Image (cartoon, rainbow, N blue to C red):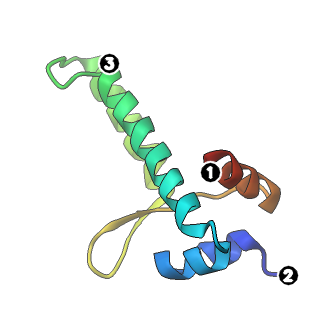
Amino acid sequence: MITLKDKLSHINYTQACKLLGPEGKKLIMAGAQLLGAAFSFIGEMFPSEQKSEEIDDLAETLKVKLSDCMEKDEAGRLKMIFTFPDESLSIKVMKSSA
């Protein structure tokens, strides 16, 4: 059986908006804001002026972990892919972001 997760993992923005229904664009934009806020928070925790081996180690760890969910498209842009254990969690995340 094809799940919502399967469908969303192989489509573009416009197709995802249509698949998610009337609130699709809002859900996707809220998710993007959530990710932006998370990365902004990480940036504030470790200001660029601070240089230390600990920060370098953390940055390398994040790079390795994120590489599991990143891939390059034909244009060389990085795409981040999320894998949820089941469809119910992905729906909860989308609803909480709305």
Q: Are there few (<14), some (14-19), or many (20+) residues within 10 Å of tag 1?
A: few
The CA distance from mark 1 to mark 3 is 36 Å
Q: Is residue 57 left or right of residue 35?
A: left
Q: Nearer the viewer, mark 2 or mark 1?
A: 1
Say which element carries label 3. helix
Q: Are there few (<14), some (14-19), or many (20+) residues within 10 Å of tag 3?
A: few
Say which element carries label 1. loop
Residue 44 drawn at (x, y percent)? 31, 24
The three-letter amino acid code for the residue at tag 2 is Met
Residue toward you, 5 or 96:
96
Give me the residue at 73% from left, 72% from top: 4
Residue 82 drawn at (x, y percent)? 58, 57
Disc nearer the start of the sequence (2/1): 2
Give me the residue at 23% from left, 22% from top: 47
The three-letter amino acid code for the residue at tag 3 is Glu
The three-letter amino acid code for the residue at tag 1 is Ala
Q: Can you identify the residue that label 1 sits on?
A: 98
Q: Can you identify the residue that label 3 sits on?
A: 54
Q: Quadrant of residue 3?
A: bottom right
Seen as rendered, the residue at the extreme left is 49
Give me the residue at 27% from left, 73% from top: 76
Residue toward you, 12 or 1:
12
Q: Can you identify the residue that label 2 sits on?
A: 1
Q: Are there few (<14), some (14-19), or many (20+) residues within 10 Å of tag 2?
A: few
